Amino acid sequence: MDFSDERWSKLKGGYGTFYDPRNALKTLEVGGDQEEAWAELWKELHHQGDVGEASFASVPVIARLVVNGKTIDWNPYALVATIEGARQSKESLEVPEWLSIEYAEAWRHLYTAGVDALENALDESLICSIMAVLAHYKRQPMLARMAILSESERGDMLSEVGWG
């Protein structure tokens, strides 16, 4: 969805209130304060397992940032994996029809970019986030939930069931 589209101002975020993510997304695009922009997107697009149309509309923009090399850390992968995980956990939560093609295309781009980035990834957060995106793309939501956890969190879980 183009930034000039007026629908941006009428979308709801993770709190169920109106949230227009364009300023934060533009900041990421032009290389402004990345940390502050990501913090805002994390706060507004996802809240305690809830997401909204603003969350879904942001995914194609985030995918474009990844593909164009505008962002190279764990944030984009982890945020889109979190958004998709929340979407899949809510039976009635679907991507709006007017956004569905662009959303699906964004996931194809994220998958390809993730496969490419994984080869040289060394940071645990980046590796886990990419693996979660790959698992979601391959329709493996439980694997995605496990992948997003750190190695020590997975170890703790396995220890609790006697596998660690």
Image (cartoon, rainbow, N blue to C red):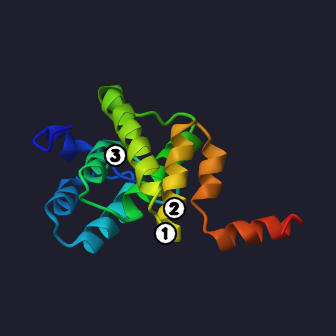
**Where does the image place residue 91, in percent across and percent down from the top left?**
57, 35
Image coordinates of residue 142 in percent, x first then y, are 66, 47
From this viewpoint, which residue is outermost toward the front?
119
Disc 2 crowd rating (10 Å Cα; few below 14, some 14-19, many 20+) is many
What amino acid type should be assigned to the residue bearing mark 1?
A: Leu
Give the x, y percent position of residue 117: 41, 55
Quadrant in the rendering for residue 42: bottom left
Residue at horizontal 36%, vertical 29%?
A: 100
Q: Secondary structure at mark 3?
A: helix
Could you give the CA–CA distance between mark 3 and mark 2, rounded to whole angstroms? 19 Å
Relative placement, left or right, of 33 versus 110 is: left
| SS at badge 1 | loop
Q: Residues within 10 Å of mark 1 (few under 14, many from 20)?
A: few
Q: Quadrant of the N terminus?
A: top left
| Residue for point 33% across, 63% down | 72
Q: Do the residues bearing badges 2 and 1 touch, measured as CB atoms within 8 Å? A: yes
- Comparing 147 with 13, the one in front is 147
Q: Residues within 10 Å of mark 3 (few under 14, many from 20)?
A: many
Of callouts 3 and 2, the N-terminal one: 3
- Disc marking residue 127: 2
Question: Between tags 1 and 3, which lies in front?
Answer: 1
Foreground mark, 2 or 1? 1
The amino acid type of the residue labelled 2 equals Ile
Q: Which mark is residue 59?
A: 3
Residue 46, visible in the rendered structure: no
Which residue is denoted by mark 1 in the rendering?
A: 122
Task: Tell me the residue at 46%/48% (across/down).
Answer: 115
Going by the numbered disc 3, the residue's amino acid type is Val
Count of numbered labels shown in the rendering:
3
Q: Position of residue 89 (x, y in %)?
A: 58, 43
